[in-house]
Amino acid sequence: MVGSFISLIRPFQWVKNVFVLVPLFFGGQLLNGVSWEEALITFAAFCFMASAVYCLNDLCDIKADRRHPGKCSRPLASGRLKPANAVVLMLLMVLLSFAVNFSLNGDRAGKVAVVLLVYMALNVAYCCKLKHYAIVDVFIIALGFVLRLVAGGVACDIWLSPWIVLMTFLIALFLAFAKRRDDVVLYEDDRIVTRKNVIRYNLPFMNQTLGLLGAITIVCYIMYSVSPEVTARFNHEYVYATSIFVLAAILRYLQVTMVDLRSGNPTTVLLHDRFIQLCVVLWMAYFFVILYV
């Protein structure tokens, strides 16, 4: 029973909330203990809120999940937990999220609470209705990552560059479309309808969209890395060298998606693909040297 509850809140998906810590890194506050405390509190608040959303999502998707070859083993779809159990757990996660959040200092708690409320409202709309509309669904997922970024900036009182916000949105959109492509493959190969909007997608559209988003993301990153504003703020004229890691990671993810056909869970890919992990580590190491050495 305990294992089913843990499975329902999906703690392995909490890695997505590291976007809360991004402002800390680029704001040059990695060595600031107070900022770390604020960021980690916000991270925890988003973890609990995200778990509440997972509970709601599984409640709304019980029938669809039973038809999915992988999702049919989820606690609600398999019958290991009752819907009432999920409702109680969802409410508990929401309460924990706001309780943790209000331990933030000063008026930051109120500001982050507003972001959490927007995130919750957006995802309630998504789970109950909007996820059935093609394109709209992936845009909402991407906006969720932008809200994580905003929450981290507000909690640590760090100004967010428009470039960082745009890059976060584009990368999240890219990953969301890659995940949707997996649903399209299931539908076209086995006629399994995992969600209503899958019939509004097809593989040629998904492949072209992923290629387009990958190209836009790379171009946007290069423009960011060579912009006078960025080189002046980092006091370093070779920021553009980090573009090679971004390009390599995106190409690798496209390979995983289109060749290996295992893009159904971006979190699993990012946690297990050594090539992408190496790109991320090298990218972060380069920026760490620029910012802190």
Image (cartoon, rainbow, N blue to C red):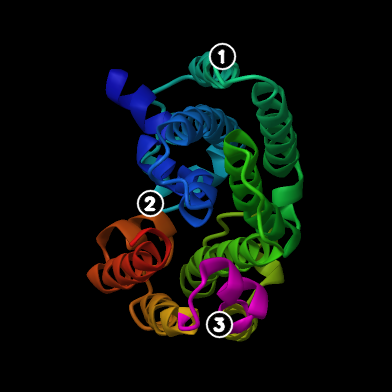
Residue visible at 44% across and 32% down in the picture: 40
Nearest to the eye among marks 2 and 3: give it. Answer: 3
Relative placement, left or right, of 199 versus 95 is right
Within-10-Å neighbours for mark 3: few <14, some 14–19, many 20+: many
> Residue 70's mark?
2
Q: Earlier in the sequence, mark 1 or mark 2?
A: 2
Local crowd size for mark 2, using a 10 Å CA cut-off: few (<14), some (14–19), many (≥20): few
Indicate which disc residue 99 carries. Answer: 1
- Marks 3 and 1, Cα distance to the nearest angstrom? 39 Å
Foreground tag (1 vs 2): 1
The image quadrant of residue 213 is bottom right
Residue 281: name its quadrant: bottom left
Amino acid carrying label 3: it is Ile
SS for dot 3: helix
Q: CA distance from mark 2 to mark 3?
A: 32 Å
The range drawn in magenta is 222-238
- Residue 115 horizontal side relative to residue 193, left or right: right
